[in-house]
Image: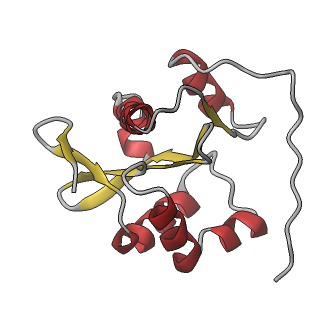
Amino acid sequence: MRKIAYNNRMIIREFTVSDHKAALNLWHTAEGVCNCEKCIYLDSRERIERFLLRNPGLSFVAEEGGAIIGTVLCGHDGRTGLIYRLTVSEKFRKKGLGKALVENAVEALKSEGLTIVKLFVLNDNHAGNAFWKKIGFKENDAAVTRSMVIKT
């Protein structure tokens, strides 16, 4: 498993399915993260495990003292990388941790031969939109996103 020392107290390492419960807690309590019925359904342990198996080595968690304080969920379809979730605990924001998680995901995508990375961020997530702009992600006004939940 790839571990990257972030600073003397924190590490960034590969996201594993055993991190699911702690990641879910972080996602469902953090401001700016979608917690609609569709996202909660997509965040089940089984779906996250399937996602991680399809995209090995692309998603990461940040830990301090064994507690998960940040996550980035990342994958690709062979052409384009996609960041699905970036979340940092409120207490640890504005310290470069989100950027470090993204950099790890982008480097992992690069090692897979990908050259484009996209993401979705809620329109009303002003802090999130400011963050993505600050680290170099451009707004794409040439496309509209649409989705449909397939009933199972």
Tag count: 0
How far from the left and from the top, in percent, is residue 16?
A: 35, 65
Q: Is residue 4 above or below residue 18?
A: above
**As drawn, which residue projects farthest toward the left?**
8
Q: Is residue 114 above or below residue 54?
A: above
Q: Is residue 116 above or below residue 10?
A: above
User: Residue visible at 73% across and 21% down?
Assistant: 139
User: Residue visible at 20% across and 62% down?
Assistant: 66
* 152 left or right, relative to 52: right
User: Residue visible at 38% across and 44% down?
Assistant: 91
How far from the left and from the top, in percent, is residue 127?
A: 61, 30
Residue 4 image-quadrant placement: top left
Quick one: quadrant of the N terminus?
A: bottom left
Task: Identify the image's colour scheme: rainbow, by chain, secondary structure or one colour.
Answer: secondary structure
Q: Is residue 6 above or below residue 67?
A: above
Using the image as rendered, state which of residue 101 and residue 111 is in the foreground.
Answer: 111
User: Residue visible at 89% across and 47% down?
Assistant: 146
Quick one: quadrant of the C terminus?
A: bottom right
How far from the left and from the top, in percent, is residue 75?
A: 54, 49
How far from the left and from the top, in percent, is residue 102?
A: 44, 34
* 60 left or right, relative to 82: left
* 97 left or right, relative to 9: right
